[in-house]
Image (spheres, rainbow, N blue to C red):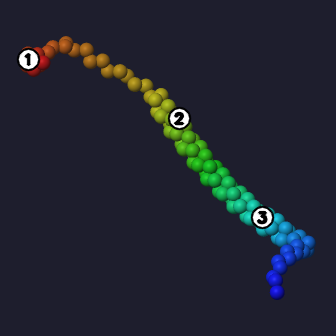
Amino acid sequence: MSFTLDLVINPIVLALTGITGILIGYLTIRIRLVKAQSKIQKLESDLLSANQETLEAQQAFVALESQVQDNQNIPVIPMKISGPAKESSKEKASK
């Protein structure tokens, strides 16, 4: 008795295998796409919150700057001390 290997390709099994492969490929790509989109949305929200913090800090800085500018409107009278510039003999000796 000789053993012969007859390879029979059933078109129905071949079609089901192809469709199953296509579905598995579609689902894996879809899952990757959903993960990537959720990661992108998380990064965008982080970026927006960082930008919002930066804008708040800039607003506080501008408010502080305007407050300092308002305080500089006070007139200041310069004091000139004009006395004789005498150097003592001790200062000359130490130099």
- Camera sees residue 34: no
Q: What residue type is labelled 3?
A: Gly
- Camera sees residue 59: yes
Q: Could you tell which of marks 3 and 1 lies nearer the N-terminus?
A: 3
**Marks 1/2: CA distance?**
51 Å
In contact (CB < 8 Å): disc 3 and disc 1? no
Whether residue 89 sits left or right of residue 33 in the image: it is left
Is label 1 or label 2 in front? 1
Residue drawn 71% across the image and 61% down it? 32
In contact (CB < 8 Å): disc 3 and disc 2? no
**Disc 2: which residue:** 66
Whether residue 41 sits left or right of residue 83 in the image: it is right
Residue drawn 74% across the image and 65% down it? 28
Is label 3 or label 2 in front? 3
**Disc 3: which residue:** 25
Residue 74 in percent (x, y) is at 44, 28
Q: Residues within 10 Å of mark 3 (few under 14, many from 20)?
A: few
Residue sitting nearer the eye, 65 or 95: 95
Q: Residues within 10 Å of mark 1 (few under 14, many from 20)?
A: few
